Image: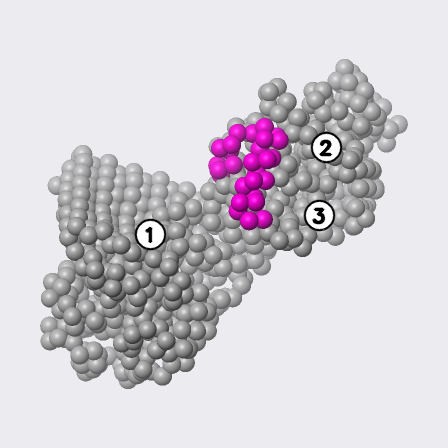
Amino acid sequence: MKNDSDKILQEVTGSDYKYGFYTDIEMDQAPPGLTEDTIRFISAKKNEPEFMLEFRLKAFRHWQTLKEPEWAHVEYPPINYQDLIYYSAPRKKPKYDSLDEVDPELLETFEKLGIPLDEQKSLAGVAVDAVMDSVSVGSTFKKTLEEHGVIFCSFSEALQKHPELIKKHMGSVVPYTDNFFAALNSAVFSDGSFAYIPKGVRCPLELSTYFRINAANTGQFERTLIVAEEGSYVSYMEGCTAPIRDEHQLHAAIVEIISHKDAEVKYSTVQNWWPGDKEGKGGVYNFVTKRGICAGENSKISWTQVETGSAVTWKYPSLILKGDNSTGEFYSVAVTNNKQQADTGTKMIHLGKNTRSTIISKGISAGRSNNSYRGLVKTTKNAENARNFSQCDSLLLGDQCGAHTFPYLDVGNRSSIVEHEATTSKISEDQLFYCLQRGIDMEGAIGLIVNGYAKEVLSKLPMEFAVEAQKLLSISLEGSVG
Amino acid sequence: MLSIKNLSASINGKTIIQGLNLEVKEGEVHAIMGPNGSGKSTLASVIAGRETFEVDEGSVTYMGKDLLELPAETRAREGIFLGFQYPVEIPGVSIANFMRTAINEKRKYLGLEPLTGAEFLRLMEEKKKMVDIQSKLTSRSVNEGFSGGEKKKNEIFQMALLEPRLAILDETDSGLDIDALKVVAKGVNKLRRPDNATVVITHYQRLLDYITPDFVHVLYDGRIIKSGDKNLALELEEKGYDWVKKEAPAGA
């Protein structure tokens, strides 16, 4: 009977990636390889200020002294960094006044992805700044945002228009010396998003950016920088899907968030990079450094992520709780299927007094995948009365997958309280039969059960994103999550 | 409606049901009684299509169709409902969401448009009143943290929503106090129609004080050894299962 249900699970979880298509847009790209010349090429292409080039070069020189980390619970063939292309941009350079001027093929791609970069989006109250490969191609709601003094634009644009803000904040949370991939990104980052919320402003719109990899052999190096000044609020959403590729694609992004006194930043992401085929061939390597700092008193940052993609994921959205009474939250659903590998989690570093953090991590493993949670909770000597609650749940589908939990606790004072709970469960044959007996087929049953399991996290997403995420969970389990 | 002929079924090579015969017609209520381990729940599972059980021999015909050919979800959509003895918890899935999915799957199968959110809510309110359950129950996760009584009431509520042609209630009375038992029985009686049928599986006679069966069958050692009207249940209550066991060879 066990074999039966496993077999069914495998059948049900074997569907193909639905977003596997490739858009043919003429590329303007750097030759493969990485030298100081490549970096000068990128910087010149983007017409960057001098300080940016210097920053890149320093990062590059530092990167050359580093070795790729090997401690994560993942395996992949060595990456030849000299084979990758470090810059590519759609040739028909943007700066459009309206969507009519955007390359129709590109719009079609977004259409396929179900990303309505059109009036529907505006009705929904979402400003979308779409990043395809490396250059931003569309932007709406600029006006509303401008009226409130909110800056939301591509990183390149910000470098041109607000170089002082970039210079001040970039690298302040994730320095280029942080790790191998952060150094690489700092040297060659192509583009990304910048959001700045001035003092006392509650951002009137959900800010949303879609990322997408779309060129063979192109490493993707995005940078996101969000700065929330005193007493401000912003909800920022990011989502991504990638087309089918035979070779592994490297994605090494950096996200930095700064939340000042009494400010709150909600960062949500649905991540759906191409995970590779059933044998694990192809697929994206997602090695990302995400970190936020609650710099001021009573500040707050929350990470909510739904991860279904990537062949290999290495990602730990972290928070430094520096301001007294600041709050950090991490809500995560990570799905792995077939031969996917994920080593993901968070770090909560409590520096300030009365700081609080919550970690809710829900791992779902199917097929022959491996899903690891790795988390660090640290309270320093000064972090009096710091509190953390962590809950790490794992759900197994079938009997060939793995779930692992690596919690690290480092408590530096007597008044802090750190709690950790962990569970591992399987979808039971009883649950499946219960659904079947009510007329819900196997696929629907798994979708229901998994979405129910992940509900605590999904409910933290903005409504619109939650709906997408639910669909995504079902899709990724259709062919892979049994 | 349901015709079971010479049915034998096993689990992991162990025979549980052997040579069972049963005829259920529209409008009828049948009670199947028997001691623990006699095969009552296995019979319910086999009719519902649980794959952990192997059908070794015999036939089951439902509404003219070979039931054994159909997967469990199709049987459900064809109108077979199983009220579970131990309803399982599905954390995070609200009853409303669960039942809306179930109803719309069934409607799709029948070639009907799915119910809209508003239509479903209306239906749910109507059925809540009918089976007398608390309003807030439906926003809770399926069976999660439910008391024994709430779980069984929830089964009856689901039955009311799905309007089955053939309902099989597997020991729905077990673990219920008398008030919950009355609620469950009331629900079953209200849902009774000339064109549907109910099979009540029970260990004790007391449920039959509230649901009056047309036929009572005694299941023993995987087969029905005695059938009769409601008086048989009373006789059983008085004399115990040992009485029929003695008669078993003759009955078989």
The answer to whether dots 1 and 2 both sit on one chain is: no
In the rendered image, the vertical position of residue A348 relative to residue B156, given as above or below: below
Q: Residue at position x 36%, y 51% from top?
A: A461
C-alpha distance separating marks 3 and 2: 18 Å
Q: Is residue B185 visible?
A: yes
Element type where label 2 sits in the image: loop
Q: Are marks 1 and 2 in contact (CB under 8 Å)?
A: no
Chain identifier of the residue bearing label 3 in the image: B
Residue type (three-letter) at the residue carrying disc 3: Glu
Classify residue B10 by image quadrant: top right
Disc 2 marks a residue whose amino acid type is: Arg
Q: Is residue B154 above or below residue B205?
A: below
Sequence-wise, the earlier of marks 3 and 2 is: 3
Between tags 3 and 1, which lies in front? 3
Predominant SS along the magenta part: helix
Tell me if mark 3 has few (under 14), some (14-19) or many (20+) residues whose alpha carbon lies within 10 angstroms of its own. Answer: many
Q: Is residue B238 left or right of residue A388?
A: right
Task: Please name the residue that numbered disc 3 is placed on.
Answer: B78
Q: Residue at x 67, y 40 (%)?
A: B163
The segment highlighted magenta reads B115-141
